[in-house]
Image: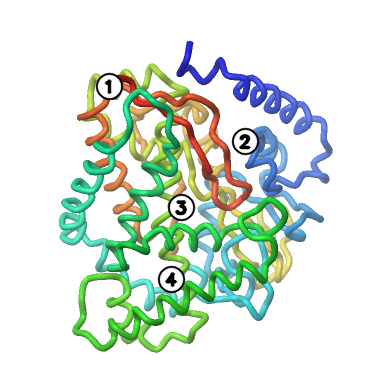
Amino acid sequence: MQGTIELTQDSIELDSRQKAARERAYSLPLAEFDPGDPELFKTDTFWPYFDRLRREAPVHYCKDSMFGPYWSITKYNDIMDIETNHAVFSSAAYLGGITIRDVATDLRRESFIAMDQPRHSAQRKTVAPMFTPTHLDQLAINIRKRSAECLDNLPRGEVFDWVDRVSIELTTQMLAVLFDFPWEDRRKLTRWSDIATTIPGPGGLVPTEEARQAELLECATYFATLWKDRINQPPKSDLLSMMAHSEATRDMDPKNFLGNLILLIVGGNDTTRNTLSGSIYALSKNPDQYSKLRDNPALIDSFVPEVIRWQTPLAHMRRTALEDIEFRGKQIKKGDKVVMWYVSGNRDEEIIERPYEFIIDRARPRTHISFGFGIHRCVGLRLAELQLKIIWEEILKRFDKIEVMDEPKRVYSSFVKGYETLPARISN
């Protein structure tokens, strides 16, 4: 039966890997757990490790990994407590920032998400007007127009890569609109987003950290030219102009400038892009939910937050302890790296009923932590939800069914939980 991904060889191999992963996760001593290993995410075999940690060691210390030692926080309410304790747990770039991977001290770049109070709120407020209800209403017109054009140009009855043709294209178009970025160069934004989060090495996007930094410098140089144009023009409603004319951001040093650019590019690209891919994949794995959605398109309103929970496009956020603290009976030391695993919190059985099931009409679909919580909660979350809602409204108008033809190729990362490719076909 072509189009039922459960029957493909890749799916059979994935099931075998998951079974082996579960056996290993429950036989391996907890002291040897390294749930941040990117290979677990690339193979989609990390789930049983977090299941066991939530039950047996919800606050867990990994002594050795490719990222150095770190604590894992795996339960929903514990993550919320870390998120809101800004006096003890810092997001600051100079301490390491927001990801499990440390960056060399001389390469650390501040952004408002990698910044503590009071500077965090001052810079965040600069871009917040982009996401007001009035502005979102204006953006919705553009989103619908471009979604319709993209979907109308998809092939019928033949296999294509959903990630490239739909997820990347639509999110990159939206980013170009938000920045008022040169349209013909918009795919540069995709590349810079991928470079910003990639792990250099053989088989990766770039072979070395030096090559990664060279491409990020290209990003900074390109945007510096646009910045000069904006600062010499009257204020406009794009993100770059907002920053150029705000007292809190107009005098940013080069590292802070690039840090905020990367934050906005990754935030506007990776999260929506991978959730859009995840929505097709989730429905393919749950055909009963797909039928439910086609029969009642009004369920889009609860389907969107459910797929954001189910996908969890950013697997974690990191904090650094500013002082010694006892947390849930564990002694966290000043300077320790503390990783909040959103992907685990979104599967916490104590908070979310039947968390491994994809249920598009959940009673409380917004009970998830994919966007973070507290002052660092994603500033663009309403835009992300709006994009997904409109795209799916347009999909349901046009196509009776979109089939996923094989297992996706996943990103080698324990930060971005995403897809490199996803073969799909629109039924004739």
The picture places residue 119, in percent across and down from the top left corner, at 44, 79
Q: Residue furthest top?
A: 1
Label 4 CA crowd tier, 10 Å (few <14, some 14–19, many 20+): many
Q: Considering only order in the chain, which callout, 2 or 1, is on the residue closer to the N terminus?
A: 2
Residue on which disc 3 sits:
270
- Element type at mark 4: helix
- Element type at mark 2: loop
Q: What residue type is labelled 4?
A: Leu
Residue nearest the observer in this picture, 98 or 369? 98
Q: Which amino acid does label 1 sit on?
A: Asp
Identify the residue at horizontal 34%, vertical 58% (top origin).
380
> Real-space Cα distance between discs 3 and 2?
18 Å
Label 3 CA crowd tier, 10 Å (few <14, some 14–19, many 20+): many
Label 1 CA crowd tier, 10 Å (few <14, some 14–19, many 20+): few
Residue on which disc 4 sits:
261
Colour scheme in use: rainbow
Identify the residue at horizontal 19%, vertical 51% (top origin).
140
Q: Split into 4 quadrants, where in the image is the C terminus? A: top left
Q: Tell me: residue 176, above or below residue 73.
A: below
Identify the residue at horizontal 43%, vertical 24% (top origin).
284
Q: What residue type is labelled 3?
A: Asp
Q: What residue type is labelled 2?
A: Asp
- Element type at mark 1: loop
The picture places residue 37, in percent across and down from the top left corner, at 71, 47
Residue on which disc 1 sits:
400
